[in-house]
Image (cartoon, grey):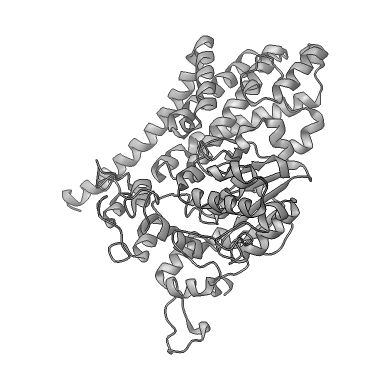
Amino acid sequence: MTTKQRHPILLVLVSVLFVVVTLLLSVAVEVVSAQQRSEDEINNMESLFELERRTNPKVLEEAGKFGTAMTIGSWHHYNYYENYHQYNIDNEKSYYHLEKSRIFLEFALQMYRWQLTSGLQSPAWIARMKSLIYSLQTKYNEIVQQITESSSSGDNNRGGDDDDADADAAACDDTDAAATATTTNSCLIKSDDNDDEQQIDWTDPIFLRVGYDNDPVVIESHKLIFFPIPKNANTQFKILFRRMMGYHHHSEDNNNNNNNNNNNKSMRQAEIDDWNDLDKVWDPLRNGLSYLGQYSRKQQQEFMLSDEWTRAVFVRDPLERLVSAYKFTSLAQEHPNEPNSVIGGTIKQNCCSMNRVRPHGDSVKNPHCLKLPSYTIPVTETNFPFDTFVKHFLPNCFDFHWTPQSNRMSPASWKLINFVGHFDSLKDDTHNLLKRIGAYDEFGRSGWGSNNESIFETNEARHATNTSSSKIEEIWKQYYFRPPSNNNSDDSSATMSEVGSLALDFYRKDYDFVVTNSTTSLFRRIPPIVIG
């Protein structure tokens, strides 16, 4: 082997060694850093974290906030075990550190899992974090086990009186108080709730208010928890929920005088207004909707476990949804209501950090970005065809528009879903959902579209991409299968293309996913290649 041949191998080995050493050092530094911080410093970090979390949930999108929560939780975990647990000291202060470590390590795990599916972090970052997350999860599991054992043995060893217990219960009813309470046993898992608590995966990011579609929408008036999934009629459902919550932003609302004709016209105008300002509909800071992450832990538990509540999700054939995602992110304007918005700006920004200042974005670090034209050049099916998207972006860019739907929540949370609707029967399933929660006559029967019809009367969601929701097999045939070899129309002679195989491998988990208490797949239509 020549010197020139050895150099690339040596460089690879050195690079791998560097990554491993960096990861180990980062874990060690984090532990030491948490241990060496003063109590005043930790208290200041907690106060700032809570202030930012309450006033601007977008700060939780920053990877640094994950580190802050991890540091705070690790500090309390260290103090609990070093100063109390190893000496069998069981008092107010020990439980204070125990509960604080639970709260902030829970935040850290929620934020990591959200980063995992949101597309904000690169695959390399996620790979580097695996060992650290395993350590955090182990710590968290130990804490939850300790809390469970302590609550099962009763509160006698902790001291306190009934007034303290009442104060703790009140703190548990308030999210902010629960996270910043100074009482030691606030929000501890009570023994009566242990069975229920064990049904809930509190590290699931659905309990965290962050992002656009991370935590589900809550309609308290009809006891509905709705888990939106991008590209599954998400926009239309949010317009429906805005209507259910009384958001009609136009002047006709104030002048309808309870006249049905005017009221129908008013609702139609509200629908038009929403479609003309989609950023308002999508943005949780503007759309006026309530989200699960805004509620206290006690309320979240009720919403997720009570038989009186409907927990609904709508799913869509994964391969068809991928086509819709391609058209929306690559062939449509980034901001539909802005005339100068770039066609294909969504995928350029989300996957390659392209913008007008950096028209080529991260193309040097991410070679797949070279497949896209520069930022201001519109994307077309010619300069960025579907097969290029699947081959180069599906495996290299995490984006919530095409994230597998089975990853929408943790397996424990999926078990609590009690209504699953399907995109290919959108009208019927939506009507059934609204009838189930007692909202069909008021919000679903009429007042939609130009003809004052029922919601989803055409059985298709309105999308900028205009992807049909009723012809899944045609989508498969057009994008994923080779034409039949014998020139006949018999589907049995068609074979899946390379692009089809890649996409199917990506969504294999979705097609294999079984609905709770059922033996059938989450998706009712399955490509023939899956069955064979």
Q: Is residue 100 left or right of residue 283?
A: right
346 above or below 83?
below
Q: Is residue 188 left or right of residue 156?
A: left
On-image quarter of the C terminus: bottom right
Residue 416 visible in the picture: no
Name the residue nearer the viewer: 103 or 22.
103
- Point 57% across, 44% down: residue: 248
483 above or below 471?
below
Q: Position of residue 57 (x, y in %)?
A: 51, 31
- The quadrant holding residue 299 is top right
391 above or below 132?
below
Q: Is residue 105 left or right of residue 344?
A: right
- Point 58% across, 53% down: residue: 265
Q: Position of residue 389 (x, y in %)?
A: 37, 60
Name the residue nearer the viewer: 422 or 254.
254
Q: Position of residue 229 (x, y in %)?
A: 55, 51
Q: Position of residue 447 (x, y in %)?
A: 62, 56
Residue 325 visible in the picture: yes
- The quadrant holding residue 180 is top right
- Point 53% across, 27% down: residue: 53
Q: Is residue 506 left or right of residue 379?
A: right
Name the residue nearer the viewer: 19 or 54.
54
Give the total number of marks visible in the rendering: 0
- Point 78% across, 37% down: residue: 195
Name the residue nearer the viewer: 484 or 86.
484
- The quadrant holding residue 380 is bottom left
